[in-house]
Amino acid sequence: MNVLSSLQVMEAERICLHEEHEPARLDDTCSALCQDGVLRHPPLAMRMKDGRYLILDGAHRTAALRQMGCRWIPVQVVDPADFRLEAWDHLVPMGTWLYGLLHDASLRWEAERRHKQLVAEVMYPSGKRLYLYAREKSHDRSEKLHAWHRIVGAYSRKYAVQRVARGSVSLPEEGTVCLRYPVCTIEEIEKIVASGQVMPAGVTRFLVSGRLLNLRIPLFLLTGSTFNHQEWEHYRKQWEGALRLYAEAVYLCEKEVVAAQTPAE
């Protein structure tokens, strides 16, 4: 199967996000897109039961394109069988945010993991672990989601969050804590989106093989009131002859390297 058959362009209104965006990161993404004039990596999406498309990876790219007035969004559509859903661990500096959560009346802290309604696990450098739950012992999805937003929002607005693969850190460094969140199912995420809600930013992690990277899709194709299919086919033919599959793991630098300013001799 030609991998380019998974690349589709659709109206921005048909696309929805499952997570919040981070304002500073959105500004950086908009600046990078404006400077390049192209979209290098199309977001990943899956078709939902209601016919809309859910962005799995690329929330900030999608939000940036919308903010820049793009009416068309190119996405690589994948099936649920083609990806694995995990959750990022967050490494965060300790601060007043943690004290605030400890005294948040809407949250309950426990020393042991007791039931399935866990919202977050906090691990300290000493190895001590605490478990966070919504104060109300409710099975209502919204109650847990609101608690989740309060926790992530407490630190993400003030500190740089380091996202790491689940289980890759045995103990956080001194002065930091590691927050771990439950892994949702794609069905749970789709229900959250269908209810008009979103998850906190930077928690879900989708592992997909066969991603299309560095296509350099011109932004001028995405801004018109009608989509120029003839121009799009022109680029598709170029991509067909330029794609290369890497079977081995690679490290992709996503930022342009700026030359150092050295003083004249």
Image (tube, helix red, strand yellow):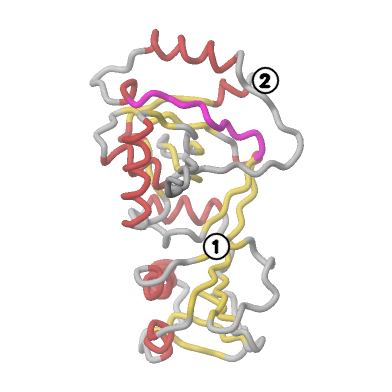
Q: Quadrant of residue 30?
A: top left
The spot of residue 15 in percent (x, y) is 37, 38
| Magenta residues, start to end | 209-219
**What amino acid type should be assigned to the residue bearing mark 2?**
Met
**What amino acid type should be assigned to the residue bearing mark 1?**
Arg
Q: Quadrant of residue 34?
A: top left
Q: Which mark is residue 163?
A: 1
The spot of residue 254 in percent (x, y) is 52, 42
Q: Are marks 1 and 2 in contact (CB under 8 Å)?
A: no
Position of 36 compared to 121: left or right? left
- Judged from the image, the secondary structure of the residue bearing numbered disc 2 is loop
Residue 135 visible in this rendered orientation of the protein? no
- Give the residue at the far right of this rendering: 248
The correct choice, above or below, for 243 with respect to 256 in the image is above
Measure the C-alpha gap from mark 1 to mark 2. Answer: 34 Å
Other residues around mark 2 within 10 Å, as few (<14) / some (14–19) / many (≥20): few
